[in-house]
Amino acid sequence: MISTKNIRFSYNKTQEFIFPDLYCEAGNTILITGDSGKGKTTYLHILAGLLKPKTGEIEIDKTNIVLLSEKATDTFRGKHIGVVFQKSHFIGALTVLENLEMASWLATGKKHTKRAKKLLEQLGIENQAFKLPSQLSIGQQQRVSIARALMNEPKVLLADEPTSSLDDKNAEKVIELLTFLSKEYKAALLIVTHDNRIKERFINKITLI
């Protein structure tokens, strides 16, 4: 699970973001919405430990990550936080399967090949395992991003605009897969989006103003 309290952040002296508190149990989903410039991606990066807030607490599985050092935060993120970025970032010279194995190896020192193959099968792209990421469609790349985010069975799954570059059919599939897999892996799921196509699917929402 994940909870936050009194999170404030600023890039400079003239603009400060004050983010609402949130609480999300394992297997549940919260949608974070808001107009452009309201700090949706900034909030997600703070929750992922990629940015350090000026004040506040972020508790994930009883650990306040704000108090961790940069190195400890990186280690914690690798083991407990999965992030699906708006733009996929893969190692271009590695196959899809090797990219997933690398994600587990960097976090645990082990290549969890069986788990990688299972995730690819669950996401319906097992036949893409030995292709390079550049050979995949945008929709397939997004599914690989989800698989990579789940490789280390995280406590929290964060998705930044996961449907923004997808057509209606693929957007629907990605949201269904995210919610299904977050429940199966017992991860709290937070989705940052401005996509009106998916807003009505979720009861739990936070709107940044």
Image: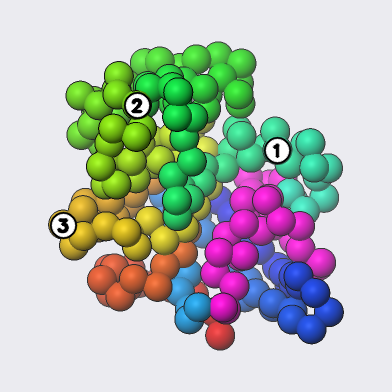
User: Toward which corner of the image does residue 113 lie, by quadrant?
Assistant: top left
Residue, x 57% and y 42% (percent of image)? 81
**Cα gap from disc 3 to disc 1, whole angstroms:** 35 Å
Quick one: SS at disc 3?
helix
Residue, x 61% and y 26% (percent of image)? 107
**Cα gap from disc 3 to disc 2, whole angstroms:** 24 Å
Closest to the observer: 112 or 134?
134
x and y percent of residue 128 in the render?
A: 25, 26
x and y percent of residue 89 in the render?
A: 48, 41
Front tag of 3 and 2: 2
Colour scheme employed for the rendering of this structure:
rainbow
Q: Which numbered disc covers residue 132?
A: 2
Residue, x 50% and y 15% (percent of image)? 111
- 10 Å crowding of disc 1: few (<14), some (14-19), many (20+): some
Quick one: SS at disc 2?
loop
x and y percent of residue 121 in the render?
A: 24, 28
| Residue denoted by label 3 | 169
Front tag of 2 and 1: 2
The amino acid sitting under disc 2 is Leu
Q: Of callouts 3 and 2, which one flags the residue occurring earlier in the amino acid sequence?
A: 2
Closest to the observer: 141 or 52?
141
Q: Is residue 78 left or right of residue 192?
A: right
| Residue denoted by label 1 | 74
The amino acid sitting under disc 3 is Lys
Q: Is residue 166 above or below residue 157?
A: below
Task: Give the magenta part as a residue range.
Answer: 37-63
**From this viewpoint, is residue 181 visible?**
no
Quick one: SS at disc 1?
helix
Image quadrant containing the C terminus: bottom right
**Cα gap from disc 2 to disc 1, whole angstroms:** 27 Å
Q: Is residue 197 left or right of residue 203?
A: left
